[in-house]
Amino acid sequence: MSKDMALLEALIEQITIINPLQLRFLESSLEGALDAELDDLVAYISYAKTQCLPVDYLAECYDLIVKDTLREQLYFQRHGRYRYSTFDEVAKSVYFDDEYMRKYMHGLAITAYLWPNHRELHRYFARTIPATQRGKYLEIGPGHGMYMMTAMRESKYDQFDGIDLSPTSVAMTRTLLGNGVFGSFQNYRIFEQDFLDGDFVPDSYAAVVMGEVLEHVEEPAIFLDRIRQVATSDAYIFITTPINAPAIDHIYLFDSFHSIESLVSDAELRIVDKLLVPYPGLSVEESTEQSLPINVALVLAK
């Protein structure tokens, strides 16, 4: 075993010490991971070490996601709704709590490689983003920065802009892109601001990416309408959002794919391509009937 892969083994070991129930899931999940994905996860662990974040801290971050999600799933099963429904109910305890937000973002970054459904979304993004298109790229809510890093690796846009209302996410994205572990990146700007408050020129972005944001806002239709305004006529628009997927800061419930389709149509956007990842072992229809999580990724156009 290489020294680098030993880092991955150490992370898995520490996770299962904290939460033994994760062992069988992680062993099965890792069998489906690509070598390049494992390399990136190891690179992320190495990157964390450069930030003086040991493996046991990363394991705690991952466990935070697991246990928070389980708690919210139990609430959802009992009540048929998400625990919170307004931004103000979650903003202070999540987006503007630096300690919690850092652990939350590191945990989510790790799930991008350890959870099969999150890997499928990431692969779909890397596969669909135009490789040679030029112009400006905008990412709304880059969070931990991994999708933006992927975009900078896989595409040739001239300028990459990210906008996030969380000061913690802004700092983490800047650090990830500037660290050098994943490559040397230039021509990027990260703004700390609410997307709806941004002073954007209409029809100015050749790519607009918004991963896992719509479920965090009270009026997702406004966000899609704003995306349509800032995107060029031939822009690549990439959106992800889940169905029936409770989490500590999910406040807008999509209960079917039809509810997402209607939102897209009302925003005068059209679906060019889509990926639906149902609950493991079930179809999309079965997952919907049982109110179980479905991950959705959409490539949209004006």
Image (spheres, rainbow, N blue to C red):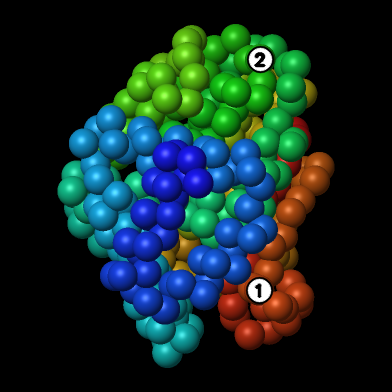
- At x 37% / y 36%, what residue is drawn? 46
**Residue occupying the far front of the picture:** 1
Q: Amino acid at mark 2?
A: Lys
Image vertical order of residue 7 relative to residue 246, above or below: above
Q: Is residue 216 left or right of residue 280?
A: left
Residue 115 x, y percent position in the rendering: 54, 60
- At x 58% / y 35%, what residue is drawn? 209
Quarter occupied by residue 43: top left
- Residue designated by label 1: 280
Mark 2 surroundings: few (<14), some (14-19) or many (≥20) residues within 10 A: some
Residue 156 is tagged as: 2
Mark 1 surroundings: few (<14), some (14-19) or many (≥20) residues within 10 A: few
Q: Work out how far the residue at label 1 is from the one at label 2, CA to CA, in angstroms.
A: 35 Å
**Residue occupying the far right of the picture:** 272
Seen from the viewer's position, the closer of residues 241 and 174 is 174
Q: Is residue 62 left or right of residue 200?
A: left
Residue 28 x, y percent position in the rendering: 60, 68
Can residue 295 be seen at all in this image of the molecule?
Answer: no
Q: Secondary structure at mark 1?
A: loop
- Mark 1 or mark 2: which comes first in sequence? 2
Image vertical order of residue 37 relative to residue 219, above or below: above
Can residue 48 be seen at all in this image of the molecule?
Answer: yes
Seen from the viewer's position, the closer of residues 91 and 265 is 91
Q: Is residue 247 left or right of residue 259?
A: left
**Residue occupying the far bottom of the picture:** 78
- At x 32% / y 26%, what residue is drawn? 175
Seen from the viewer's position, the closer of residues 144 and 202 is 144
